[in-house]
Amino acid sequence: MRAFSGLTLILALSSLLPGMAAQAATQPWLKLTPMQQEALAPLAQQWDALPEVQQNRLLATTRSYPRLSPKQKQRFLDRLTEWSKLTPEQRNRAREKYKAFKKVTPDKREEVKKMVLQNELEKIYGITASGVSRIPEVSEEEQRR
């Protein structure tokens, strides 16, 4: 379940990024705490143009940031960076996939997660000419990442 917790967070943030009409920033970037700036660094350039509602939702996500391990913090930042680079169409597709995924039963969800992880590993390591994967079996620990 943790393997997709970062994805869940990013998808939850999906409605918070640019693409909507900007309103005046109620919380200018320079007024954010150092911890908030660290957590929201991928959005530094866009921050002041974000509507107030988006800023408030993003600021809410920073409350748990100090309690994250360094690895979790990096994952959060990486995913927020990836999300901020998506086009509006890509974000919409990701939202639709997320909605569909949430409707799937927990058992089926785990099966899908394993398939996605296996697919990602195959992209990295490739497949042999016979079509047999050269990828070792995925451990439980790797699945949780």
Image: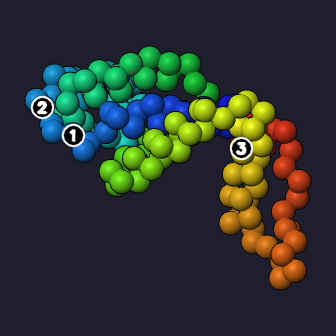
Instruction: Label 2, secondary structure: give it.
Output: loop
Residue 85 drawn at (x, y percent): 37, 53
Residue that label 2 marks: 23
Along the line of sight, which residue is nearer the eye, 88 or 47? Answer: 88
Residue 134's place in the image compared with 14, above or below, is below
Q: Callout 3, which amino acid?
A: Lys
Residue 77's place in the image compared with 123, above or below, is above
Q: How is the image coloured?
A: rainbow
Q: Tell me, yes or no, if residue 81 can be seen here.
A: no
Q: Callout 2, which amino acid?
A: Gln
Residue 44 in the figure: left or right of residue 92:
left
Q: At 44% from the left edge and 17% from the top edge, which residue is drawn?
A: 63
Choose top left, top right, bottom left or bottom right for residue 22: top left
User: Spatial distance from mark 3 to mark 1, Cα to Cα?
Assistant: 31 Å
Residue 20: image tag: 1
Q: At 16% from the left edge and 22% from the top edge, which residue is drawn?
A: 26
Q: At 75% from the left edge and 38% from the top edge, which residue is drawn?
A: 108
Q: Are marks 3 and 1 in contact (CB under 8 Å)?
A: no
Residue 19 in the figure: left or right of residue 12:
left
Residue 27 in the figure: left or right of residue 145:
left
User: Spatial distance from mark 3 to mark 2, Cα to Cα?
Assistant: 38 Å
The nearer-to-camera label among 3 and 2 is 3
Residue that label 3 marks: 113
Residue 60's place in the image compared with 20, above or below, is above
Compare marks 3 and 1 and give the one earlier in the sequence.
Answer: 1
